Image (cartoon, rainbow, N blue to C red):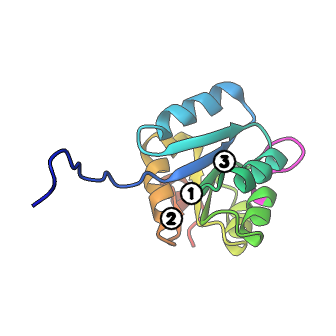
Amino acid sequence: MESPGAAEKAPRRFCLVLAEDNDDVREQICQLLEPEFEVRRAVGEGAALVEAAAEVKADAVVTDIQMPHMGGIEAGEQILIRRLCQAVVVLSMYPDAHLVKTALQLGIRAYVLKMDASEELIPAVYAAMRGERYLSRGVRDKCPE
């Protein structure tokens, strides 16, 4: 029998760091992710993403591909090499087969088109956290494996 007042522990929410150089898009992605995940920090470029991942001990990062100073694929590669988090999910406007292949070869688990993000970003993060590969619908249609 539980002691009076003992509460069931809620499952721990995964903690994320987000990188997106467009302020409005960054805010929209945060709003999309926050009901499901704890977004510990949101930054506007790749070098800041690597720094934030090291500081906040996130479970995963979600990053735009094209950002000033350092892109999301390069930042993701540094994060994975340094083992700063468990998974990297990239967001892109375009299903570029070369970028998809490069990202996956570097250990990035999920590639999501921004146009698919409202339906597929959350499942992509969960898949990446399980160690699974995830390509959003628009990527699968244009860049079959």
Label 3 to label 1: alpha-carbon separation = 10 Å
**What residue is rendered at 55% in x and 35% in y?**
30
The residue most toward the right is: 69
Q: Residues within 10 Å of mark 2 (few under 14, many from 20)?
A: many
Which of 52/25 is in front? 52
List the residue tagged with mark 2.
129
Which mark, residue 92?
3
Nearer the observer, disc 1 or disc 2? 2
Provide the residue span drawn in magenta: 66-73
* 78 lies left or right of 35: right
In magenta segment, residue 68: yes
* 41 lies left or right of 59: right
Q: Of the residues under marks 3 and 1, which one precedes in the sequence? A: 3
Circle 2 SS class: helix
Q: Is the residue 138 above or below the residue 35 in the image?
A: below
Circle 1 SS class: helix
Residue 58, image x and y in percent?
A: 61, 54
Circle 3 SS class: strand
Q: Residues within 10 Å of mark 3 (few under 14, many from 20)?
A: many
Q: Is the residue 134 above or below the residue 41 in the image?
A: below
**What residue is rendered at 77% in x and 71% in y?**
81
Q: Main SS of the magenta segment?
A: loop
Q: Residues within 10 Å of mark 1 (few under 14, many from 20)?
A: many
Which mark, residue 130?
none
The image quadrant where one finds the C terminus is bottom right
List the residue tagged with mark 1.
139
Nearer the observer, disc 3 or disc 2? 2
Residue 65, image x and y in percent?
A: 73, 50
Residue 82, image x and y in percent?
A: 77, 69
Q: Please state which amino acid type lies under the numbered disc 1.
A: Val
Which of 98/41 is in front? 41
Picture quadrant where residue 11 is located: bottom left
